[in-house]
Each structure stands twice: as structure tokens, then as C-alpha cells.
């Protein structure tokens, strides 16, 4: 195998990707030792350093581990989720049962006594820079006491928009503060973008599985959903998308190209480029949901689709709720050719964002601790995911598969097909444990045996108990013993 | 004249209303002394105290003034605005020129160097309890540092919803915290309510003139606007409304029954009752915009239409942005029979409100200083309105008329018909003064000679200069000298 120097992806990334593929395809089996670094360097015509960087990346991705005085070994991993049920493109409205199920799950998630192991709502206050944000808030109020006493007007804090533009460069986006509209979190960003680019009756392409609130949101706007096959590792199928675009079957597309919710997968850089080209060629707006972009485990961040946007058809939507301050609910849109329409719509739909919260965020971003904080967050979430996957491997029924997220803190678990996870959800409620059944993430019945889980909680005894208990219930429902099939050795638990 | 003891309105209110009517109709002319208190008590069969209370109310409303050792006199007031141009009910979409004008006005309003005398955005930080809110914020963060580090989930702060329910009793509304949905300000409340109760193509009844952002909001949702005659003193014409309801010509109604924006008028208690009955009879949802309810100058507050809502057709929308903390943008809805639909829609449209801001507000409301603060605010805004009306009487062209608001801080000025206030807006921009032309408040050309002005700014030299200068430009455009016609004596200026 030879790597191409001219490719825009750094060499060590390419090298890591090819070994990752070998691991996922089973060519390199769990427990096997990786070839010696010097040999890999020779056979791939790269430097020793490049191999070391690649191994580092694979380690960060949880695929290999270093053993002292011995070398690098392929880690025991849960079997990966692979696309199982064939997709048939069907335009659908959510049924009222589906909407009711969303309500039930959400109501349960809200219950203070329940242990939540699947909502994507950071609850581990210690992970977030609360103390620093508090100090900034207090200091802003001391210096400018009437900040609270003045009305927040669109387009909102100039300083925050400048900081956002400055940071967007990290993800390859060249933006000015004037091109950015502040929103009430990412959910409002998506809502405004949908309202700006669609008409009732339009059809919107979605990844499958996708974030469950998109279904009722689309329905509330009179929009139909068309689910597009999405590979648990490679992400959205661009071939399927291109077919739909050629046939003019969708008028807009929502996708999460990095650390997708719920799968955790990322489109490759090449596919991001291709996606940008597709939507610009077919003039169909893409709502790029970048909510977990900065929580990708690979560093440097892979560029956004927006960074390849030639003609303004990509509407980039994101928020600080998962990265800096879960409580602040400040998001933003860079809407390309739709900027003016969306800025207007924001003003008449909910006016502007709080100056106090915006200026606090701006000062935090300007003061330079953000990257350090993100590194801590990524490490912690990656470690939590590892721990959770380890517990699942031991306690969930044989045949269980799980995705290996490339970022964020949610992942996707597919149980043996005989397990109905809606039924499981109800069983677990009786034990005060909340999970989100796969059925929520599609209008089809395709994921009735799947679960989304989340690692944004403190990884304490309560959380691990709930995860183990979920596994036990799943074993009962599946009529199968726990443990991985194929006798794959388990990774020792560190908790 | 005899007053009815059985009426639900207190006696002194009825008495005050009848004298107010006499003043507005010109039966009691400016400068005239009111009859002696004892004589009024005898002729109306009420106690001396009732008359004193009525006089107090009239004084609060700016209609009479006490002169030491002499008695009560009818104040020199600006002629009241009366409905002038006949309404013809027409369903309309906003023209793009109208939307562009809104954009231009809003862009100008945002300019930091411009003097704004008409936007309804409190900018007088000193008027608001910023210091106390800052202390509460800081103390909450000290006691619960990870407040910021936890995700805000719908339905939002239980404590704030409880405080809101407790206070809603003042306005006659009996609500539980479960019936309240927190929103991102009143604008989002209206937006959500519209989305919940209408379908694209529906027609929504509006007061005329009405809040200008409603036109682009309706247009963005594919809704048509039908403007209903609204009397500058009596408010929305319920006769016209009933006709429209009978003819099934509107599918929803937005109204501001107290301290209407931009007129400042209030529906009488009887008319509020009738309005509630109408929408419940015809099953047409009323979006009651209660944004200025707590800034009504009369005390006790007149009850909301919602308080007479028999069958859940009234959706009450309001916010704390004009009353407590302009920057906080926390509003709420009590949506009656639409509660569940709107709570769902809120969650999928923008999730929830910040816990930090919500808990701060809750603690402020619970700690008991709110009513005192509201009294201060009402007094200041009432005084500002008086000052502004005085300046207008002296500096605006003969024939100018103005509304006498019953609450809030905005009012409506109608200039001689030959003045085009869009033209005037552009002239004033050159002098860095911002006003909002009447044309914004309707899709018709009915208010092309009107202006909305606002008194939520510090009443300093800059503000008075801008008001005088606006008058001078208006005189030029009208080709008329300044000063009230009919030689009505001016009230001495206290600034």
C-alpha cells in the first residue's frame, strides 16, 4: 500500500485510516500485535514519526493500545454496527404513536429520580468550566452593571460574533462576524434555517438514523422526511443522496457530517468535499449540523462541509451547549446565500440573544482557555465511551454490536433482532432507568432493536449500575447470555 | 349620572371613567376647574373618599392636576387621536417594500451613534434592578457553581413557573406551574402559538395599528393578515371582530388588550369579558399579548382576557423583558387548550430557557421587591410620557394629535395629513435621529402621517433635543408653525 503525498489529508491520517479499515474489516484481529513501526515505515514509504503519529491517532480512536515493553496491540472491540436492513426511500410523516413515544421518552428523561444513560444533555457540571464562566459573569456585571438593564437587539454581540469567526478558521471556515447570526441554541438554528429554505409540502433529506427531534420539527412545519442510508462508519451515503438530488426528490438536506448523532461517525474529508459540491451543483440547501464538530477525537479537526462551500448553499448550524456552557443555549448560523433571510427570520421569531450570556462566552473564548478545555472534554468523553463499551461487551447479550464514535458522547447499540427496545424502554422505566429506543431515530421500523446511549454523565457507580442493569434486561428479552460472541477477549475494566 | 354598585368595576373607577370621557369629548375643557368634591359626591351618590380616589386615578392618567389652594383642573392635553380613515377589511401580504422599510428602520435603530426616540427597547439601565439581579446571579453561581454546566431541559425552571403562577393571580389568572411554558421572550411565545394554532394560508386578525414585527412573522409562516379597526382609546372594535368571526374570515387573532402597542389603549373590563366570550363561542384562538400588562398605570391591574377564558381558547403570551430584566429574554405562555401542542413545539423549536437566568428571575420574584420596582417603573414611564407629550405640544406642527397611553412607554402621534413620515424618517436619519414611521404598523397606507414614539430612554438633553428636532422637521414638512391649534394653554415644562 502506498500513500499519496499530494492528498490534502496528512499522511499519518491516511496511514491510520488504512489500519483502522483493516481492524474494522477483521484483517487485523483483536489481541493481535501490530507490525513493528520500522517495518511499517519502510513498507509505506513514510517516516518513523508518521507511523508514531498514526498509532497515536488509532490509540485516540480506541482501536489499539500500547502494552509496556511489548508494542501496540489491536484492542478488543465490540463488533461494529454495519448497515443491516435495506433502505427503501419513502417519504413519511411521523405517526402519532411515534410522536407520543418521543413525548414519553422525554417526559421520563426529565424525571429527577431516574438514571439517564442516553440523553445528549451534559449533566457532569464538573466537566465544564463553570467556575471560570461564573467569574467572568460576575466580573462583567461589576464592570457594567446595566448590561442586564438594556434590551438585547439583533444581530447580537459583535464581540461574540468576532470570536466565533476567529475560531471558525480552525474548522476551515473563513467567515466575518457579519455573516454570523446568533441563535437560541442549535435547535433554533435548524428551525430557522428550515423555515427560511423550505415551503410546507417540501421534502427534507435526513440521515438514517438521525436526531429524533427532527421528525416532530419537520412535521410542525408541514415538511416530509426522506431518510437516506447512512453507514455507521462512513456516514451518509452520497451515492443515494446524488440519486435523490438528480430526481429532485428533496428540497433541503439536514446532515451531521462529523460525530453524527446517534452513530458518532464522520464523513471523510473527500466525502465532505463531494457533499459540498453536490449541494452547490444541485442548488439544494444543506443544513450542516456541526454540534459535535469541536468534540471530534482526531486533532486537527477535520474541516466542515461549509469550508468547501463554493456558492453559499451550505448553512452551518451549531451551538456552545455541548462544548462550553450547557446552560447558556447560545448557538449560531453561518447561512451563506440565505444569511439575510435567516437574520430577518431570527429577529421576528425570537429577537436576539442575552447580552450577558453572549459577552460572557465571548470573554471566555477570547481569554484562550477554550482549546485546553476542549482537549480535556474530548479525552474524558473518549474515556467514558471506552468504559461504556467495555461494560456493554460484558453485560449485553451475545450478538450486540456498537458503533465506535469518532467524537461527541453518544453511540449506537444494536441488540439481537428479537429484542424490541421500546418494550425494553418500558421495562427499564420500572427500574428508574431511561434509555432512548432506536425507533425514535427513524420513521421506519428499521431500528426497533437499537438503542442510543450517551456518556455525558459522570461515570459513577450509579451510571455503571444502570448500564449493567440495561444489559441484564436486554439478555432476558433476547433469551441470550451476556458476553460477546466469538469469544473475543474483553478489555480489562479500569473502573 | 348614577353609578351602579353591582358593577364589578370599583365605584371610583366608574366615576373616573365618566369624567375622563367628559374630558376627552371636550365637555370639560382644558384649564377648567372640576366641580367641588362634595358636590360630585352628592350628585353621584358616592362617598367623598370615592371621589378622592377617582380624582387620584384621573391625575395618574394625566387628565387633571391639583393646584395648591385652588382645586383640581383639567390639564392641557394634546388632542386625542381619533379613528380617522375608514377601515375596509382586506386580507393582505406585506409588500417587499414594507419588509424593506422594517429592515431599514431596524438597521438604523441599531446604529450606536443614533438617538433613538421610538424603539420599545428599554435602554435606561438605571430604571431596572440590575444591581439586585447581579447580586442574585453571583450568589446563585456561588451556591451552585455547576448550574452553568448542566443542560437546560424543557419545561424549564419549576421554581420560576411557580412564581409566575403565583403572580398571575394579580391579573386574575388562576394557573398552575404545569400550565406554563417558558419561552425565549414574548416574540417566541407569539411565534410558537401562531405555529401551533394555524395552517399556512390561514388568516390572522390583528389590531390596526399593531406591532410591526407581526407582519413579517405572519408572512414567514404563510399566514395572511386582516387588520381590524382599533380605537385609539377604546381599543379593538369587538363589533368588527364579531362580524369577522361570524363570517369565519379569521382562524386566529392577536391582540394586546392592555397598554396596546403602539396606541397605549386598554380594553375596558367589560370588553375584555366580551372578547373572551367571543373567541370561546366561535372557537377561534386569541393570542393575548400581555407584554405591558404589569406596566398599566391604573392599580389594581385590570384583569387579562385570559382571566375570563371559559374554555381554553385564550393563549396568554408575555415576557419579563419590559418589566424586570430587558436582557434576560425570558417569556412565558399559558396556552389553555393548546398547552400540550405548544410545549412540544417549544422543545423541538428551541429546547428550553437558561437555568441561570430563570433561577435568577425566580429568586427576584420570590424575594418580594418586584411590586415596588413595578411602581417605580410605572411612575417613571408615566412621567416620561407626560414630558414627551408636553414637548410635542410645543414643538410639533399645529394639528398634531397624540394618544394618552394607559400604560407602557410607547405612544402614537398623528401629524397633519400632508406629512409623510417615511420621508420624515429619512430626513431625521441625516440628523442621526431614529423614529418609526406609522406605515410600519399596518399593511395599508392608513398611517402614513403617523409616528410611534417611545419613552423608555433616559429623559435627558439628548432625548429632548431629538424630540424637538423631530418636531421642527415635522413643521417644515407640514408647512405649519409649531404649537397646538385652538390656542390651548400649554402645561408648564418641568424639564
Image: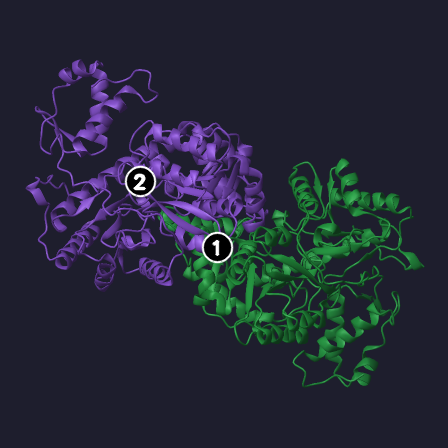
Chain colours: A purple, B green
Which residue is painted at 70% across and 57% down in the image? B262
The reply to whether residue B352 is in sight is: no
Q: Position of residue A9 (x, y in %)?
A: 32, 22
Quarter that holds the C terminus of chain A? top left
Instruction: Name the chain under label 2.
Output: A
Q: Position of residue A98 (x, y in %)?
A: 35, 59
Secondary element under disc 1, as helix, strand or loop, is loop
Which residue is painted at 26% across and 49% down in the image? A453
Label 1 sits on residue = A222
Residue B391 higher or lower than B163, as above or below: above
Of A455 and A451, the residue lying toward us: A451
Crowding at label 2, few (<14), some or many (≥20) Cα neighbours within 10 Å?
Answer: many
Q: Position of residue A246 (x, y in %)?
A: 43, 38
- Could you tell which of marks 2 and 1 lies nearer the N-terminus? 1
Label 2 sits on residue = A408
Q: Residue furthest right?
A: B487
Side of A165 where B476 appears, left or right: right
Q: Nearer the viewer, mark 2 or mark 1?
A: 1
Q: Residue furthest front?
A: A247
Side of B410 where A437 appears, left or right: left
Residue A163 higher or lower than B300, as above or below: above
Q: Position of residue B241 (x, y in %)?
A: 68, 69
Secondary element under disc 2, as helix, strand or loop, is loop
Amino acid at each position: 500500500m502506498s500513500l499519496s503525498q499530494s492528498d490534502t489529508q496528512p499522511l499519518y491520517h491516511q496511514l491510520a485510516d488504512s489500519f483502522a479499515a483493516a481492524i474494522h474489516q477483521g484483517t487485523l484481529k483483536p489481541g493481535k500485535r501490530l507490525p513493528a513501526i520500522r517495518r511499517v515505515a519502510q513498507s509505506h514509504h513514510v517516516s518513523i514519526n508518521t507511523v508514531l503519529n498514526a498509532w497515536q491517532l488509532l490509540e485516540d480512536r480506541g482501536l489499539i493500545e500500547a502494552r509496556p515493553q511489548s508494542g501496540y496491540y489491536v484492542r478488543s472491540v465490540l463488533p461494529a454496527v454495519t448497515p443491516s436492513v435495506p433502505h427503501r426511500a419513502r417519504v413519511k410523516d411521523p405517526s402519532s404513536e411515534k410522536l407520543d413515544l418521543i413525548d414519553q421518552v422525554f417526559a421520563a428523561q426529565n424525571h429527577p429520580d431516574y438514571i439517564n444513560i442516553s440523553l445528549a444533555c451534559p449533566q457532569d457540571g464538573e466537566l465544564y468550566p463553570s467556575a471560570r464562566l461564573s467569574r467572568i459573569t460576575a466580573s462583567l456585571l461589576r464592570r457594567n452593571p446595566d448590561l442586564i438593564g438594556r434590551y438585547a437587539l439583533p444581530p447580537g454581540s459583535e464581540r461574540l460574533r468576532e470570536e466565533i469567526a476567529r475560531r471558525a478558521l480552525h474548522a476551515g471556515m473563513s467567515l466575518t462576524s457579519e455573516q454570523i447570526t446568533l441563535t437560541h441554541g442549535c435547535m433554533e438554528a435548524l428551525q430557522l434555517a428550515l423555515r427560511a429554505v423550505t415551503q410546507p409540502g417540501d421534502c427534507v433529506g435526513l440521515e438514517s438514523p438521525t436526531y429524533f427531534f427532527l421528525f416532530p420539527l419537520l412535521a410542525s412545519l408541514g415538511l416530509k422526511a426522506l431518510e437516506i442510508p447512512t453507514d455507521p462508519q462512513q456516514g451518509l451515503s452520497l451515492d443515494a443522496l446524488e440519486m435523490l438530488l438528480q430526481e429532485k426528490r428533496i428540497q433541503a438536506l439536514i446532515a451531521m457530517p462529523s460525530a453524527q448523532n446517534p452513530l458518532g461517525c464522520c464523513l471523510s474529508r473527500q466525502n465532505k468535499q463531494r457533499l459540498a459540491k453536490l449541494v452547490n451543483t444541485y442548488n439544494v440547501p444543506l443544513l450542516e449540523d456541526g454540534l459535535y464538530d469541536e468534540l471530534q477525537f482526531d486533532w486537527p479537526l477535520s474541516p466542515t462541509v461549509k469550508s468547501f462551500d463554493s456558492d453559499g448553499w451550505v448553512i452551518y448550524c451549531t451551538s456552545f451547549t455541548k462544548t462550553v456552557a450547557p446552560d447558556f443555549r447560545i448557538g449560531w448560523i453561518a447561512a451563506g446565500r440565505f444569511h439575510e433571510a435567516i437574520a430577518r427570520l431570527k429577529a421576528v421569531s425570537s429577537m436576539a440573544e442575552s447580552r450577558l450570556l453572549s459577552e460572557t462566552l465571548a470573554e471566555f473564548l477570547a481569554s484562550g482557555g477554550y482549546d485546553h478545555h476542549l482537549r480535556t472534554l474530548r479525552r474524558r468523553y473518549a474515556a467514558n465511551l471506552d468504559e461504556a463499551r467495555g461494560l456493554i461487551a460484558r453485560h449485553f447479550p451475545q450478538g450486540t454490536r456498537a458503533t465506535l464514535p469518532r467524537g461527541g458522547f453518544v453511540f449506537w447499540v444494536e441488540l439481537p433482532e428479537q429484542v424490541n427496545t421500546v418494550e425494553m424502554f418500558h421495562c427499564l422505566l420500572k427500574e428508574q432507568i431511561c434509555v432512548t429506543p432506536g425507533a425514535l431515530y427513524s420513521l421506519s421500523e428499521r431500528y426497533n432493536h437499537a438503542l442510543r446511549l450517551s456518556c455525558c454523565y459522570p461515570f459513577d457507580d450509579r451510571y455503571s449500575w444502570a448500564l449493567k442493569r440495561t444489559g441484564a434486561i436486554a439478555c432476558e428479552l433476547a433469551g441470550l447470555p451476556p458476553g460477546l460472541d466469538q469469544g473475543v477477549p474483553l478489555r480489562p475494566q479500569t473502573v
